[in-house]
Each structure stands twice: as structure tokens, then as C-alpha cells.
Amino acid sequence: MAGHKKPSGKPKIFWRIFISLVGAALILIAIVELMLYLFGATAAAEVSVRRQGGSNNGAVPGQRYTWSVDYTYIDQNGKQHDGHTSRRGSDYSVQTDHRVYYFTFAPFVSALESDAEPGFSQLLFITAGFILIAVINKRKKSPKKKEAAATKAAVMPVITDYDDSVEEYYHKDD
């Protein structure tokens, strides 16, 4: 039978990096939303909505459809910026905010008021991100500790005289 080829470590490393980046992105999204709420400027937004796709008949009536929410706002410098998000809503309408949080130094980073407000979603994103990073990068116990214990056992001197010399060997530090 032919010898088995050892698999390359490249796919393993790729997935570790990829999943770590996904975890970091989740944490970054949550932190940016919180920073928008804490340090961002606000502006009035002009909002337009349109319903997308079919209904989810298993959901409660107020959450059956996905609505595309587009908003436009004018920053402190008078420039117009656009944003987009999606919401779950009923057959005929969806609840939207008409205030936007944005960074004055980067007005293209924005969120509707309800997305930026601190809540369970940010905590969930941060927790999921840390779990992904921790699980994928968990260190395996190295076999070096087992080898070290085996080496210590092998260093013990060979004792051929089993009278008092054994006792003397173990009590010589007393």
C-alpha cells in the first residue's frame, strides 16, 4: 500500500484566519454602532421603503416581510449622504426611524437611530465574535509536557542496593 501523504497546513491556516476575521468583523460592527451612538452627530433623514420578496407565513404578522430601507441625510457640512438597511415588517408597512447617527470625520459611516442605540444585538455580535476567535485559535496542549515528565522519570539513577541506600537517596536533602 502506498504511503499516506501528510495534508498541507495551508487549508487549516486559511480557515483559522478567515474565521478569526469574521469574528473580528462582528466585534468591529458592534463597536462602530456603539461609537456612533456615543460620539456620532445626528441628522434628520428622508426615508423611503420598499417591500422585498415573499412572506414568511410562519412569522408573526408584524414580521412577515423584509423591507428595504433607504435613507438620505445632509451632514454638518451640507453634503448629502445615502444609507441602506433592511427591516422586518408587516404586509403593508414597516417601522423606521427618521434620525441618523454618523461620524463627522467619516459621514459615509452611518446608521439609523434604532440600529445605533445600545442593545442586545451589539452584545450578541461582540460575544459571537469573541467566541469565534477563541474557539478557532484555542491552543492544543503540547506533547512536550508529557515528554518532559517521561524524561524526568528516565533521569532517575539506577539503584542496585535496596537496603538503606534507597532511603538515603530520597532523604539526603533533609
Image: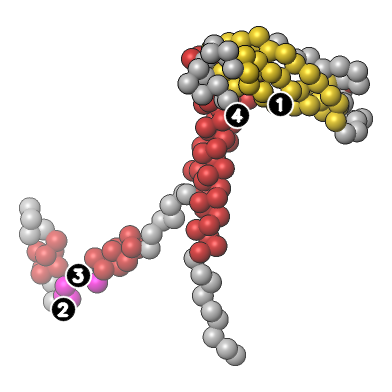
Front-lying residue, 132 or 46: 46
Q: Is residue 2 visible?
A: yes
Looking at the rendered structure, which numbered label has been put on residue 124?
Answer: 4
**Dot in front, 3 or 2:** 3
Quarter occupied by residue 33: top right
Q: Is residue 26 above or below residue 47?
A: below
Residue shown at 91% from the left, 33% from the top: 54
Circle 2 — which element?
A: loop
Can you give x and y, in whole percent of width and height, for residue 115 in the image?
64, 20
User: From mark 3 to mark 2, how far is it between C-alphas?
Assistant: 12 Å
Q: Secondary structure at mark 1?
A: strand
Q: Nearer the viewer, mark 4 or mark 3?
A: 4
Badge number at residue 160: 2
Q: Nearer the viewer, residue 48 or 125?
A: 48
N-terminal-most mark, 1 or 2: 1
Q: Is residue 159 magenta?
A: yes
Do callouts 1 and 3 mark residues in contact (Cβ within 8 Å)?
no
Range covered by the magenta-colored residues? 153-160
Q: Earlier in the sequence, mark 4 or mark 3?
A: 4
The label shown at residue 85 is 1
Helix, strand or loop at disc 3? loop
Q: Please name the residue that numbered disc 3 is placed on.
A: 156
User: Quarter-wise, where is residue 125 in the image?
Assistant: top right
